[in-house]
């Protein structure tokens, strides 16, 4: 799992945008969490 807090602010924002785009494209939150190596709770927020 990625420790997002260790990423630079720009990298955090990039990851956030990619996660949101993946969910908006129809992928499930669980799939997105697995793909990006983040927690399901983070994706749902």
Image (cartoon, grey):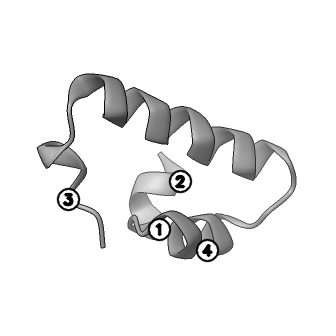
Asked whether the residues under the numbered discs 4 and 1 touch, taking CB atoms below 8 Å apart as contact, a structural biologist would say: yes
Asked whether the residues under the numbered discs 3 and 4 touch, taking CB atoms below 8 Å apart as contact, a structural biologist would say: no
Identify the disc placed on residue 3.
Answer: 3
Comparing labels 3 and 2, the label whose residue is closer to the camera: 3
Please report the residue visible at 61 percent of the width from the left and 74 percent of the height from the top.
Answer: 30
Q: Nearer the viewer, residue 33 or 45?
A: 33
Q: Nearer the viewer, residue 44 or 34?
A: 34
Please report the residue visible at 50 percent of the width from the left and 63 percent of the height from the top.
Answer: 36
Whole-number angstrom distance, CA of label 4 to CA of label 1? 6 Å
Q: Which residue is mark 4?
A: 30
Q: Which residue is mark 2?
A: 44
Comparing labels 1 and 3, the label whose residue is closer to the camera: 3
| Position in image of residue 13 (x %, y %) | 41, 28
Q: Which residue is mark 1?
A: 40
Whole-number angstrom distance, CA of label 3 to CA of label 4? 18 Å
Whole-number angstrom distance, CA of label 2 to CA of label 1? 6 Å
SS type, badge 2: helix
């Amino acid at each position: 799992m990625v420790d997002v807090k260790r990423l630079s602010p720009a990298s955090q924002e990039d990851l956030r945008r990619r996660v949101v785009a993946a969910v908006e494209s129809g992928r499930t939150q669980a799939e997105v969490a697995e793909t990006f190596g983040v927690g399901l709770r983070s994706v749902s927020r």
